[in-house]
Amino acid sequence: MTRMERHGASQSQVRLERSMLFVPASRFAMIEKAARSAADAVCIDLEDALALEEKVAARANVVRAFGELDFGPRLRMFRINGLDTPFAYRDVIEVVEAVGDRVDLLVLPKANRAADVAFVDILLSQIEASRGFDNRIAMEVHIETAGAFLAAREIAGASTRLDALIFGPGDYAASLHAPLASIGEEDSHDAAYPGHRWHAVMHTVVAAARANGLRCVDGPFAGLGDTQGLERAARIARALGFDGKQCIHPAQLDPVNRIFTPPADEVAWAERVLQAYETSRSRGRGVVALDGKMIDAANLRMARVTTEQHRLIQARLRS
């Protein structure tokens, strides 16, 4: 049973996340700018973006941001520290107890097994019940270790809170002891490998997500001045089926949003496919043809995905 089926969710509840902008929790001025940015989602980071000595005090900035700032239509999320650190449970408790009614998603890094997701789910349920929150905080989970790759299927089905899986290339490479010069960028090691080095894990993330009715988001690209490299990485992710990509600088938002926006010709084709199907069905015909091509169930599903993405993007532009 997929997440959509478990929740009885409708298409109108699907979230738009072409771009997720990371911002360090220790830098409140940067959070303020992110809340007004072109990002579809803003993730206030308590994990990798902070030095150890900043992590505890930075929780107050997360609480302040969600309590005071207007994020408009952007998804409001924060990333906790890994469950293998002494910070994670207090990250959840201190932020969610204070402003859980204003949080859309919690991001869990370095999940290695389904039990990791279940632990955070239970913790969130306890806080929500204690505080009497009406909303239910969703979760996004990083697949970024060897263990997570092997357990992706179980992780993706571990909780009805799950909304998306995220591929984390940097930590994944470290987990495999695979050389990596810069996160998300291609280097001499990519040139030496006859294929895309991360194809297996990226395909697994997409497949595990889709099998459970989840979205999937590609990891960041560290080359801030390499727009061409960023666009190539984003196009590869879109070709594999990802919904969007993480960004580490506002300058990356426009190209990422553009690449993960279905172009006008794709939208027009999808609308024509759906119209041809409805016309054929109204006439009692089971076979659909358009421009000399047969339209089957897979074409219909792809057309519905494209038109739904277009609807969400148009709603975002109007808001």
Image: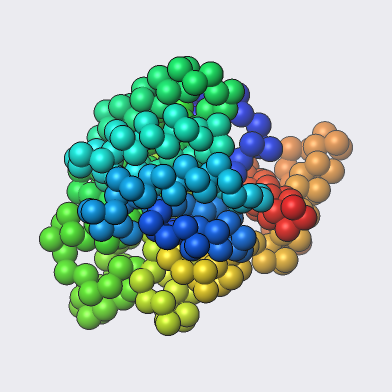
State the residue in front, 102 or 239. 102
Q: Nearer the viewer, residue 306 or 72?
A: 72
Q: Report x, y in % for residue 98.
A: 47, 33
What residue is rendered at 27% in x and 61% in y?
170
Q: Using the rendered image of the protein, determine whether residue 226 is visible from the camera's viewpoint.
A: yes
Q: Which residue is drawn at 18% across and 59% down?
A: 174
Q: Horizontally, is 270 left or right of 128 in the view?
A: right
Visible in this render: residue 295? no
Quarter location, residue 140: top left
Please, is residue 88 above or below residue 30 in the view? Answer: above
**Displayed quadrant of residue 224:** bottom left
Judged left or right of residue 302, residue 49 is left
**x and y percent of residue 46 in the render?**
35, 50
Q: In this view, does 274 lie to the left or right of 147?
A: right
Front-lying residue, 171 or 196: 171
Residue lying farthest left? Answer: 177
Q: Position of residue 270 (x, y in %)?
A: 71, 55
Name the residue located 16 percent from the left edge and 57 percent from the top edge: 176
In depth, the one of 114 and 222 nearer the eye is: 222
Q: Is residue 303 above or below residue 136?
A: below
Write the residue at 76% across / 44% down: 277
Question: Could you tell me how many numbered marks the image carries?
Answer: 0
